[in-house]
């Protein structure tokens, strides 16, 4: 059974949630068995995700039943769902019980607050290896999906658990959305070792989030950079959380200042700060910085997680020799997915990545083999003949002005968006001085809020002046 669920202590809790629904390993094995026994035709399902026990059970159950879910947030725009439904013609919808009336279809299975609905769409041929589809970052409304194969999720969960040193006594706080590759990995990496995941819908700015974090005696938390920005506003470092021993980070690059703050907090309190790096295409995790290196290797993503290999390639796609080097980051390992899908016909395609993925991230490797992300190939502008990283500019502006920030633009002008009481003219003066480029190459705007996805990533296409 998936992640050896039926081999775990059946009395132990696999996950629980804000509604008080607890699912033991015995319950979860039974759920998978019930769903499989229905003999539902193998087909694509649209799953509207909420962070609760019902959704987690459904996604895991699909791995056993041969159903291939496409994961969306439950608040996904219905027009977008309709458009994607015309592309992938799902045979099932998997939805929270309170949304059943919004969708047409015959109820074929229901448990823990989630229901499987059979639509009028007929199943069609899909590759036997295909296990899951996730939309890529920033592709909301686009049919582009990452094709996972059987073995991706479980191998990455086991290797991530090994990197973190999880045991059956660990309890992970999961507020990252299940439809986000890292949120799913938080759940599965605890399942891999017989531990427990607490699934919450509480917002990081809500006192209830921290109440539950303490009451459930969670031992670890994984956040994206925006998560830690929110936590710092609430003076997280002053909270009494005696059971919390691991703070993990992924989903983007922390500013140098925040990285140091987290490393120093962990050292001061006897906790562990673990920076990680991964992509949807590599099943969430592919690099990990050991906690003892946090303050010695500020900003590093570390080295490959167990079972994988990181390397750098040049502009021609050739691997660079070991030792200090800079190039595009690439990864080889069992978590590498099959490739992309744009149409339902693509779901018949075989594995085109073949266990190796080029990330599109530019990175530096030091003499000791530690990696540092320096930017994205597509996140550079050439302003007045000078190549400038928008990611780097965002980081230094955040540190200097203590504000949220996002940069976009063209080779003619970089557009900088900041929040709060920061004056745009001060931002332009600062970044012009920092880069040595004329002020005319920059425009800054003060906006109410930086548009972000459920996982905290900036929606650059939605940036616009007030």
Image (cartoon, rainbow, N blue to C red):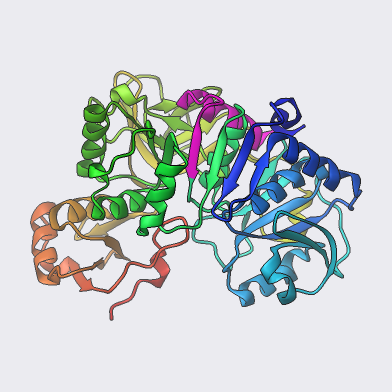
Residue name at image x 39 percent, y 54 percent:
378
- Please say if 162 is above or below 452: above
Residue 184 point in image, percent of width and height: 57, 45
Q: Quadrant of residue 78?
A: bottom right
Task: Write down the region rendered in magenta.
Answer: 151-173
Q: 316 left or right of 23?
A: left
- Please say if 234 is above or below 198: below
Residue name at image x 75 percent, y 58 percent:
45
Residue name at image x 82 percent, y 62 percent:
91
Q: Quadrant of residue 443?
A: bottom left
Residue 445 point in image, percent of width and height: 22, 73
Q: Answer yes or no: is residue 166 visible.
A: yes
Q: Is residue 87 one of those drawn in magenta?
A: no
Q: Answer yes or no: is residue 354 visible.
A: no
**Along the line of sight, which residue is nearer the eye, 397 or 361?**
397
**Along the line of sight, which residue is nearer the eye, 424 or 320?**
424
Residue name at image x 24 percent, y 55 percent:
233
Residue 139 point in image, percent of width and height: 54, 62
Q: 284 left or right of 114?
A: left
**Along the line of sight, which residue is nearer the eye, 189 or 450?**
189
Location of the C terminus by quadrant is bottom left
Q: 273 left or right of 134?
A: left
- Please say if 446 is above or below 172: below
Q: Is residue 160 one of those drawn in magenta?
A: yes
């Amino acid at each position: 059974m998936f992640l050896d669920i039926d081999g775990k202590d059946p009395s132990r809790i696999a996950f629980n949630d804000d509604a008080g629904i607890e699912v033991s390993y015995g319950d979860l094995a039974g759920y998978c068995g019930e769903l499989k026994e229905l003999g539902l035709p193998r087909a694509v399902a649209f799953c509207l995700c909420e962070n609760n026990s019902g959704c987690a059970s459904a996604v895991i159950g699909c791995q056993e039943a041969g159903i291939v879910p496409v994961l969306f947030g439950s608040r996904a725009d219905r027009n977008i769902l309709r458009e994607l439904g015309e592309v992938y013609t799902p045979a099932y919808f998997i939805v929270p019980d309170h949304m059943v009336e919004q969708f047409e279809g015959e109820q074929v299975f229901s448990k823990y607050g989630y229901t499987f609905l059979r639509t009028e769409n007929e199943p069609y041929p899909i590759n036997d290896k295909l296990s899951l589809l996730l939309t890529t970052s920033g592709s909301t409304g686009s049919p582009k999906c990452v094709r996972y194969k059987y073995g991706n999720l479980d191998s990455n969960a086991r290797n991530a658990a090994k990197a973190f040193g999880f045991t059956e006594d660990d309890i992970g706080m999961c507020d990252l959305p299940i439809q986000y590759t890292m949120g799913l990995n938080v759940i599965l990496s605890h399942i891999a070792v017989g531990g427990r995941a607490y699934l919450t819908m509480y917002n990081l700015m809500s006192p209830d989030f921290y109440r539950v974090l303490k009451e459930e005696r969670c031992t670890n938390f994984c956040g994206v950079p925006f998560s830690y920005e929110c936590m710092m506003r609430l003076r997280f470092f002053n909270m009494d959380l005696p059971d919390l021993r691991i703070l993990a980070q992924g989903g983007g690059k922390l500013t140098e200042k925040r990285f140091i703050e987290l490393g120093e907090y962990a050292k001061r309190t006897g906790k562990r700060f673990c920076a990680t790096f991964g992509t949807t295409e590599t099943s969430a995790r592919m690099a990990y910085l050991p906690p003892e290196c946090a303050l010695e290797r500020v900003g590093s993503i570390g080295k490959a997680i167990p079972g994988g290999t990181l390397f750098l390639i040049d502009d021609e796609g050739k691997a660079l020799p070991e030792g200090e080097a800079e190039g595009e980051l690439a990864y080889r390992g069992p978590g590498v997915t099959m490739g992309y899908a744009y149409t339902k016909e693509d779901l018949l395609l075989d594995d085109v990545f073949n266990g190796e993925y080029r990330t599109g991230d530019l990175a530096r490797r030091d003499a000791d083999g530690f990696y540092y992300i320096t930017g994205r190939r597509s996140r550079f502008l050439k302003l007045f003949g000078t190549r400038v990283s928008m990611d780097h500019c965002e980081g230094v502006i955040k540190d200097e002005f203590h504000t949220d920030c996002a940069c976009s633009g063209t080779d003619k002008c970089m557009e900088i968006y900041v929040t709060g009481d920061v004056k745009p003219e001060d931002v332009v003066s600062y970044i012009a001085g920092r880069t040595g480029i004329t002020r005319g190459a920059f425009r800054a705007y003060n906006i109410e809020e930086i548009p972000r996805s459920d996982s905290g990533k900036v929606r650059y296409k939605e940036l616009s002046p007030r």
